[in-house]
Structures are given as C-alpha cells and as structure tokens.
Amino acid sequence: MRFSQAFMDADIVQDEEVSFLLEKISCPVERVSSSKVVYDAVNNAQDPISAAKKILYITRNRGAVVRECPGTSFYTCCDYTILHTGTFCTMDCSYCILQAYFHPPVLQYFAGFRQISQALKEVFSQNRIFRVGTGEYTDSLIWEPISLSPAFLVETFARQSNCLLELKTKTINVDSLLTIEHNEKTVLSWSVNTPVVIREQERGTTSLAARLRTARQCQEKGFQLAFHFDPLVIYPGCEAEYEKVVDDIFAHVSPEHIVYISLGSFRFMPKLKPIVENRFPDSVICYGEFITGLDNKMRYFKPLRIRLYQTLVQRIRAHSPQTLVYFCMEDQEVWEKCMGFFPGKQGELGGLLDDSAILHCKLRSF
Ligand code: SF4
C-alpha cells in the first residue's frame, strides 16, 4: 500500500491506533483543519479516481457508525448491518461501484476505536442476531497492513455472542488476525471470480489461487468463511470457468466452515459506464445483453442470469448440498427457477442467513 500523500484532521489525537498508522505509511502527512484541502487535492488531479487511491485521509466518522444496509425494495434484501470504518479502496476494479458513488471518492480511514466500541455496545446489547460487515464502502482488509483496526474488531466481536463480524476482501492481508482468539465470531470472506475476470477487471487484487490458499490458512486457525461470486460476468465459456472456481473453493476449504455463498451478476448504474470506458479502455464489461432493472441499474438479460446461476447452484450443491447459497439483489422468478423457492416475506432471507450464522458462529440472542 503506497500513498503519495496523507492528510489528517488537526484534532485527531495521536493515540496508539494513530501512531501505528503513521508509522506504517511512508509518506508526508499534512494536518488539515478542513476536508476541503483533501477534496481539492483529489479533484485537481487529472484522474481524480486514480489519485484518490493514493491519497489517504485520516479523519473521524461524522455520521452513523452502524447502519442498516440500504438494499432496495425491488429485490430480496439480506438485512445486513454495515459498520462504517472507512471509504474507498486502494485496489482498482473496473466494475467498482465506489467510483461512481462518491463525489469525489476519498480514501478515508475513520480513526477512533472508542467511537466504534460505543456504537457496537448498543448492537451487542440487543436481543437479536446481527450480521455486521465493514466491506460495503471499502475492502475490509486493505487496512490490515497499516492499521490495528481489523485485529481490534476481531477481538471486540470475540467478546460477545449475538453478532457475526464479516471481513470481506480481495486481499490476502490476514497476518495480524491469525493468532487472535476469535471465538468463531469472525467470518473471513472473499469475493471470487474467474482468473480471466480477475486478470482483466481487477487491477491490484490478488489471484484466485492466493485468495483460496489464504482462506485455507484461516480455516486452519478456526475461522468461519464465506465466498461471494459477485459480480458474475457473462462471456463466452464463462460457465465452465465459474464451475472450476467452485471446484477450487471446495478443493481448498471444507464445507463445514462455509457460512454462506452469495451469487450476484454484474449490474451497474448507467453513470458508471463512461467511467469504465474512460479509466479501463480495454474493458468490454459494460457491453453485453443488458436491460434496465427495477432499481434503474443495468443488469444482464434475465434468461442469461438464470442460466449462469443454475450452473453455479448445481455445482455448489454437488459439492455441498447443505451450504447456504443466496442471491444478492434478485427477484422471485430468479429465486424460484434457480433455488426452487423464494424467501419473499420480509426478513425471510435474513432469517436464513441468521440461522446459518447461529450454527457456524455459535451465536445466541438472550
Ligand atoms: S476490491 Fe472492491 S472496493 Fe476495491 S476497487 Fe475492487 S470492487 Fe472496489
């Protein structure tokens, strides 16, 4: 992780967390009294999105630390809870929604373990199960080489019983986590794809083989695991290549350690397309048989999605009939044709995921 520059709010106290971070980043750090300085540095670059991946902003979270995943009312939602620890990413995937989501994108690290602890205390004291993740607005583990935060979270979740922590990544940054007494409350999860998609669309990420080797290493340390086939990209011959990814997963890890596997096909807001065309001129990812979905995102034509999903579901079930497989943002027809059922009632999909979390992570509410 190499930064060209770092900014830090003037009022951030240099405690153990911040000292560790400053020691690890080898670039000049400028204290700022306004975020405008950071936004200007990003906006004035020729390619603000690329520049933002090299400019670190150490700041405080001034909004909600814990929030419900926005989901959408049109597609089945999994009732996930987001722990907001930072934004943006140092890796560079062509399809990354964060390129179009933030204006401009800024690589923010939210310092302040006390603020996180307080917000989590509320969650830990409720009489219900939570699945909490930090990988919605950033990659959960890009921070691990420079920050005590991932280890702090694993240790914090180990001391409670009603919440699962999911750290979702495309890195292999787990070194500081492997020796922690995690009490099975942390799920390490990887977004996976075919080697050709990783090579052509995911700049700066690790290979599939490296991700799966790391997953096995984590399993050996007793961690629970999850895998996300998202985004599935449709191209000639993709079915066989995705089947091979499924085979590779089960060749590396045991089904008993997999809490869930999600499937989601490539979808994008129309405003992402010019960004991809501009920043990834060789990418053809936005050219295919797309239609506009109910949420105004472009999605593959439904029969194409269903065919690929059916192939994957069948392959996963051949390896492990009991593993929970779910769709991220799909509709009734897709569920019924691929899974044979539709968790359409409010909270139903969340309930299925909670049950698997309870089983694998030994969760309990009061
Ligand atoms: S790893 Fe995730 S967050 Fe990072 S660029 Fe890729 S899609 Fe975006």
Image: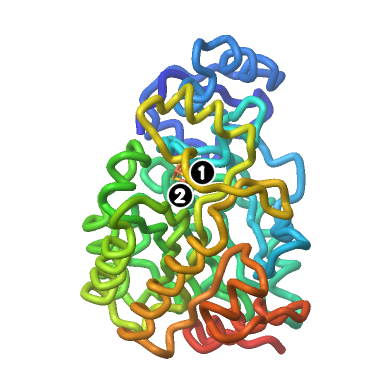
Count of numbered labels shown in the rendering: 2
Q: Is residue 184 left or right of residue 333?
A: left
Q: Residue at x 59, y 72 (%)?
A: 334
Q: Is residue 175 visible?
A: no
Q: Quadrant of the C terminus?
A: bottom right
Determine which of the numbered discs, if any, sits on residue 148 in the image.
Answer: 2
Q: Residue at x 43, y 35 (%)?
A: 90
| Residue 239 against residue 99 in the figure, above or below | below
Question: Where residue 130 sits in the image (x, y, percent)?
Answer: 66, 73
Q: Quadrant of residue 284?
A: top left
Q: Is residue 342 left or right of residue 97?
A: right
Determine which of the numbered discs, if any, sits on residue 188 in the image.
Answer: none
What's under tag 1, amino acid-wise? Answer: Glu
Q: Secondary structure at mark 1?
A: helix
What's under tag 2, amino acid-wise? Answer: Leu
Question: Where residue 70 sits in the image (x, y, percent)?
Answer: 73, 56
| Residue 39 against residue 239 in the figure, above or below | above
Mark 1–mark 2 CB contact (< 8 Å): yes
| Residue labelled with disc 1 | 17
Distance from disc 1 to disc 2, alpha carbons, whole Å, reads 6 Å
Mark 2 Cα-neighbour bin, 10 Å: few <14, some 14–19, many ≥20: some
Q: Residue at x 48, y 52 (%)?
A: 140
